[in-house]
């Protein structure tokens, strides 16, 4: 009866949880960096570098949630 509720994806539960945790940590780091850079008045062109940690954090969330 529970056969339809099989886990879909190629990641184990532990690996998916680990990627979600890494996504949360990296999102926190990126937010702190963004706040510090805005507080210091860094030019917006340099703040655009924050795209990288935000993007990688989103990738961790996606792979953890969809088990890919």
Image (cartoon, rainbow, N blue to C red):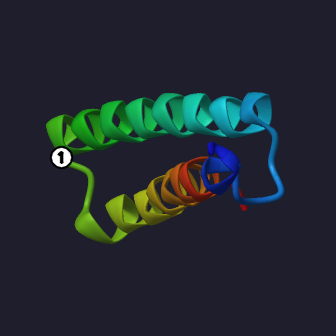
- Identify the element where label 1 is drawn: loop
- Is 30 positioned to the left or the right of 60 in the image? left
In this orientation, which residue lies closer to the viewer: 36 or 25?
A: 25
Query: To which quarter of the image does residue 17 belong?
Result: top right
For image coordinates 54% across by 59% down, the residue present is: 62
Q: Is residue 25 above or below residue 20?
A: above
Query: To which quarter of the image does residue 15 belong?
Result: top right
- Image coordinates of residue 7 in percent, x first then y, are 70, 49
For image coordinates 73% across by 33% down, the residue present is: 13
- Is 18 positioned to the left or the right of 41 in the image? right
Check the image and name the residue furthest to the front: 1
Q: Is residue 48 above or below residue 62?
A: below
In the picture of the structure, the residue carrying the numbered disc 1 is 41
- Image coordinates of residue 5 in percent, x first then y, are 61, 49
Q: Is residue 11 above or below residue 36?
A: below
In this orientation, which residue lies closer to the viewer: 16 or 5?
A: 5
- Image coordinates of residue 48 in percent, x first then y, are 37, 67
């Amino acid at each position: 009866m529970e056969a339809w509720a099989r886990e879909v994806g190629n990641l184990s539960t532990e690996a998916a949880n680990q990627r979600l945790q890494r996504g949360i940590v990296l999102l926190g780091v990126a937010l702190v960096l963004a706040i510090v850079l805005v507080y210091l008045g860094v030019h917006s062109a340099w703040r655009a570098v924050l795209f990288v940690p935000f993007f990688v954090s989103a990738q961790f969330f996606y792979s953890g949630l969809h088990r890919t």
